[in-house]
Image: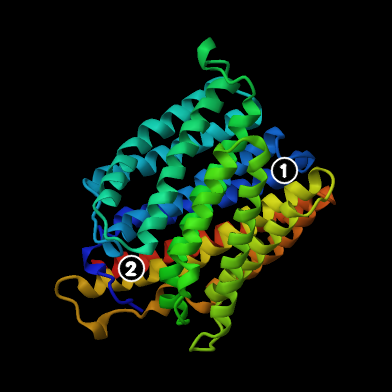
Amino acid sequence: MIGAGLAPEQGPPFTAPLRFFLTAPWFLVAAGLLAAFDPGWTEGPLSPTALALTHLLTLGFLGMVMLGALTQMLPVLAGAPMPGIRPVATIGHASLTLGTPLLAWGLWRGEPAALLHGAGLLWLGLAPLLISAGLALADARRLDSVHAMRVAFVALLATLALGLGLAGWLADALPAGWRPDDPFIWLRAHALAGLAGWVAILVVGVAWQVVPMLQVTPAYPAWATRPLLVVLTSAVGVALLAPAPWRVVGEIALALGLAAFALVTLDLQRRRKRKLASPTLDLWRLGMLGLIGAVALFALPLPGEPARLAGGVLFLVGFAASVVIGMVDKIVPFLAWFHLRAGPGTSAGALPGMKDFLSDAAARGQARLHLVALVCLVAAPFAPALAVPGGLLLAAAGAVAGWNLARAARLYARHRR
């Protein structure tokens, strides 16, 4: 399982990424319950409920896992440990855990104080983690995956800066000279930098390493690594910064680049060396199909808000959440097993195997709940009654994921003692 060039012994203490991984599923639960008990999100992507849901998913779930994964991948993959990893991971995790619900509550209920306190807490708490990650990235090895991380990191900084400005605008707390003439320009840039620049490009860069390593596939072809990263980075830049008539060119290039990545990944998975069924492989396949579906819905000239909402659900829940769950279900058992094996006074025969930390049966049940929830949620913009079962199923999938990971952590702790 350990790929060439990786050095897991250089990784941080297991508690640094684990705290992020254990907390993330409960934001999926919160998002599912909100989607079920307030189906007003089906009215449009800018409704208060839709905005709150988006931030519970992006900051609470995806952000928690992705930042936790960075603490592990930077030293292991890039050979660049993050300075002060213990305190910065603790502070960053606390800020996400406390600031995200405040921000989501402020968006949902229109509470300026909650909005400002949530945004401020996120910025203050994440700043040490982001500084540490930036220093590590500056000193990292020159690998295609690391280049993708650098691009995604810059996009994350832009996303957070724009988000802070939008929170100040919504709370009417910005000085007169700082207020945007057209806040929707900021909103578009915030969404594009966050979803395409941070989430999508980071997933693409990580996939170059984890898909061949964890799914035993051939390596990505040369054109689908650095050249594709150049295309995606340029496309996001054009879509964000170019004059209005040229932005559509960037959006088209971005859509084609992401669709090409998804199709290549599906082909590599089809040609994998071991043809054994795997719930995590199924989640990755679902993620690639979700990405293709999201690109198609945003590219096709379909009228009305329901198509845009369905595309957003396919991107966040179908693509990003599916892939992230598939990664965590592999990473946590491996890290638990590795840290136990590397501990003093342990013998390989006394250790549990990786399947003991998270069995295929447990992962498969979670994946099935996630799939049915996705089907309901994608259809909910067209049939709002489906928001209730879709949200409850998403909450159930998140709860099962949280239970599975907590069980793996308990087994690790028992053997560690």
Q: Nearer the viewer, residue 39 or 37?
A: 39
**Quadrant of residue 355 within the rendered picture:** bottom left
Residue in the picture at 79% in, 43% down: 305
The amino acid type of the residue labelled 1 equals Phe
Q: Secondary structure beneath disc 1?
A: helix
Residue highlighted by disc 2: 335
**Image quadrant for the C terminus?**
bottom left
Q: Nearer the viewer, residue 346 or 14?
A: 14
Percent from the top left, x then y, of residue 348?
Answer: 24, 83
Percent from the top left, x then y, of residue 9?
Answer: 22, 68
Residue in the picture at 82% in, 48% down: 384
Residue highlighted by disc 1: 37
User: From this viewpoint, is residue 366 visible?
Assistant: no
326 above or below 189?
A: below
Residue in the picture at 42% in, 50% down: 151
Percent from the top left, x then y, of residue 147?
Answer: 38, 56
The amino acid type of the residue labelled 2 equals Leu
Left or right: 291, with 163 as reference point: right
